[in-house]
Amino acid sequence: MRSFFEWLSHSKKQVLILLVLTFAYGLFKIINYSFSYDTDLILLDSKNIMDSWLGLGRYFLVFLKWIFSTYDDLCLINFLTYVNIFVYSILFIYFLNINVKKTSVLRDVLCGTLLITSPFFLEQYNFTLQSFEVSFSMILMVLSYIFTYYYLFRKKKILAFITIILLISTFGVYQSFINLYIVGVLISLYKINDLSFKENLQNIFKTVFLFLIGMLGYFIVSNVVQDMLNIPDNPYLDNMIMWNRQSILTTLFGFLKDIVKLGLGIGEIFNLSFVFSYFLIFWFLVKGKRSRTQKIYIFFLMMAPFLLNFLTGSRVIFRSFLSLPIVCSFFFFETYHWFDWIKFILILCLIGQIVNGFLLLLSDYKRYLNDVEIASKVYRDCGNSDDVEIVIKGLEYTEENVSVYKGEVMGYSYFEWTADGENADRYRINNFMKIHGFDAKLPTDDHIAKLRYMNFESEYPNSGYYIVDHQVCYVNLGN
């Protein structure tokens, strides 16, 4: 069993290739300034958004934001994010290679690239306000996998202590890391492959202990931080729990519908790796030589990415589905040498992800430039003055102005996000305009009410889409 640095010294080729692929894939995002929904909040009012995170129990996210001061240099944040992506991909490939005798440069590169180009990670890191912190915490999470494995193998308590500290930290960044750790535990138990029922039971109890202490520590730290800083609970996560909000049948149908969409690709999120890797591992377990214990671990591993959604009844939010690329990469790694043609399936999945990723990156950049153009035109037409109050009605979809390839969030305009299902959020539009130097006044409730009765000749960008009345500019974006 090789240490990480010993493995690294023998794996220079795949490390170098993954380094090149990481920054080749991320270069467009790094060099082209743009941002999407929510990043405006950190740029204009960092304290408010961090208080909101604390109310969600994301204290370590706030700590990382404070310690690294990753607030407004978006190009630097994107660069550091891809540094983190490279590091955790290398660590994960090392984790997969622990106790594996048959090495393969191509297998390591392909399975690592599956993480680097995952559309779920791409959508997550499109939220630049937290991309560095979440990707940095992915490094800590993969380290928790490694320490968990070595704790079970070597039975040293210091390794358990380090793992608990890592869990208390990472759970305090993003609740999806709870699923991520369960995935790592199952892979560790599978890799140890102890045929003794007693030893397996002991290992399971040890990992449950680590998980429960990590969760307990997370809740304690979260509550202490909120009490010390007088931060109220944020109801955002409570609103995700659907079992008590609608019928069980409706909840189950919505959940299963999302799983089917996940397999086939939802909207423009193309994800062949899910269907192929799950099919291969299932067939591998049926035909391959694996112990009964390993088959049980694989069965639970197949379900693990959906655990939080099943417990809460919530619909699948793809940018929070960070455990699925980990599982798919492991399944491909495990079945890689079974048949020669598996490598070609993996390459096909990667081509789909890479093409999909570049289309999303390019489209979201075009969306950003279009948003800037809309903000600029509205500001100019309304008087080009900070004294003007701009009141906006309706939505302006990106595809009305430029061709766009939309993902779950990427490609969606600031001028089409809705607060109530009808009108664009006035604060977010005002934020976006303010960041770009178009610092108009926020609309008052009276003028918003008056907007309902305004008769516009047309909608944006046609002549007659706005009406100016006593330093108040009423704008009609359209239906």
Image (cartoon, helix red, strand yellow):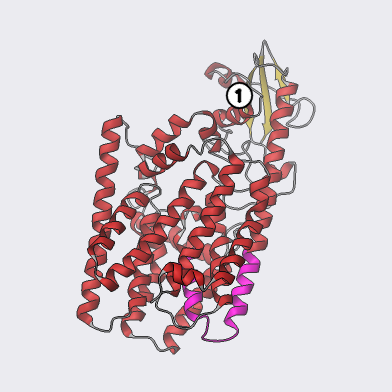
**Does the magenta-highlighted stretch encompass residue 243?**
no
Characterize the magenta stretch by its predominant secondary structure. helix
Q: Is residue 313 visible?
A: no
Quadrant of the drawing holding the N terminus: bottom left
Eyeballing the image, is 29 above or below 104?
above
Quadrant of the drawing holding the C terminus: top right
Return the residue nearer the eye: 29 or 52: 29
Eyeballing the image, is 10 above or below 398?
below
Residue visible at 65% across and 68% down in the picture? 351
Eyeballing the image, is 141 above or below 443?
below
Kindly identify the amino acid type of the residue bearing the numbered disc 1.
Arg
Eyeballing the image, is 67 above or below 253?
above
Return the residue nearer the eye: 376 or 72: 72
**Does the magenta-highlighted stretch encompass residue 337?**
yes
Q: Which residues are magenta?
A: 325-353
User: To which residue does mark 1 refer?
Assistant: 452
- The percent coordinates of residue 249 (x first, y second) are 38, 59
Residue 348 vs residue 446: left or right?
right
- The percent coordinates of residue 23 (x first, y second) are 63, 56
